[in-house]
Image (cartoon, rainbow, N blue to C red):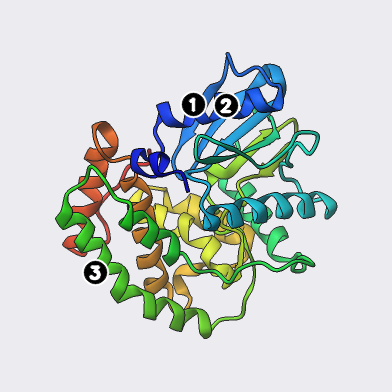
Amino acid sequence: MNAAAHHEGLTRASATRALVTACKVAGLNSDQADLLRLGENAIYALPREGLAVRVARSDAKSIEEKVTKELNFARWLRSQGFPGVGPRDDLPQPLRAEGRLVTFWEYIPPSRTEPGLTDLAMLLRALHALPEPDFALPALDPFPTMWRRLEQAHGVKKQDVEFLSEACSRSEAAFHDVVAQHPTGLVHGDAHRGNLLGHGDRILLIDYEAVAVGPQSWDLLPTAIAVSRFALPRPDYDAFCRSYGQDVTTSEGYEELRTVRELGMTTWLMQNAQAGAAAEEFAVRMESLRKEDRERRWHAL
């Protein structure tokens, strides 16, 4: 892995350098690139090129395996006729640029169609009914990603990193116990409304980085957690449950899985919590986790 990329982390500046370099290699114009999201990856829109571009945090082997899986899964979903977004296979990918991996995807322009929670529920129900693909998918395990984030943490308090590390250590065995007791199947891994796109009269499910095989209740957790953490109205959650056919909060192991999911959400935010609104929200989440306050409101960033 490029040492400079590891040290700097994924910032707007470092991601843009990788984007520009990769686009030059692919013969693309990146002058009007628009940064859509900066999180686990940086995602850019290049509307004139008809592309969305994902810049990964590094080109380490573990990241390369995820990127390869994501590309393969997107192609497989397309073969199944599932409403998703595919890679642009007319371009070379993934490309290495500035110590990061860059991939090119179909660009879906902004739509007046606003995806709702019932759309998410129906897409998850359809996804969960698909057979497993004819290539290996990893077992659901969010901990390697969380451990990597904690090992590479910078610009946050040492005591916060230590607390999260201890919390992950306590939760890891409980998570695997719960997984061992549940039937497994195809799991999106990061199923929330932010990973839906309107496209004409269709709703698309995007972002396959966390796709795995595991308890499918994992995909229902973000919406359930949103009731307590993000003030999702209860009637909206009830409609989600009716559309999917299950209320995950009544299932065995829910509290253990919720704890793991919230640790994942917090370590994700930690990566960009050096200043500003992200730092303020990280402090809110840390305080609520320390106090074991399950009702403290969080804010989506």
Q: Which mark is residue 243?
A: none
Which is nearer the eye, 136 or 210?
A: 136
Q: Position of residue 276 (x, y in %)?
A: 25, 31
Q: Is residue 110 visible?
A: no
Q: Secondary structure at mark 3?
A: helix
Q: Under tag 2, what secondary structure?
A: helix
Whichever of callouts 3 and 1 sits on the residue coming sooner in the sequence is 1
Please tell me which residue lies in front, 287 or 121. 287
Which residue is at the front of the view, 208 or 13?
A: 13
Which numbered circle lies on residue 166?
A: 3
Element type at mark 1: helix
Other-residue count near label 1 (Cα within 10 Å), few / some / many at <14 / 14–19 / ≥20: some
Q: Position of residue 53 (x, y in %)?
A: 61, 32
* Label 2 or label 3, whichever comes before in sequence order: 2
What kind of residue is marked 2? Thr
Residue linked to disc 1:
17
Packing grade of label 3 (10 A; few <14, some 14-19, many >=20) is few
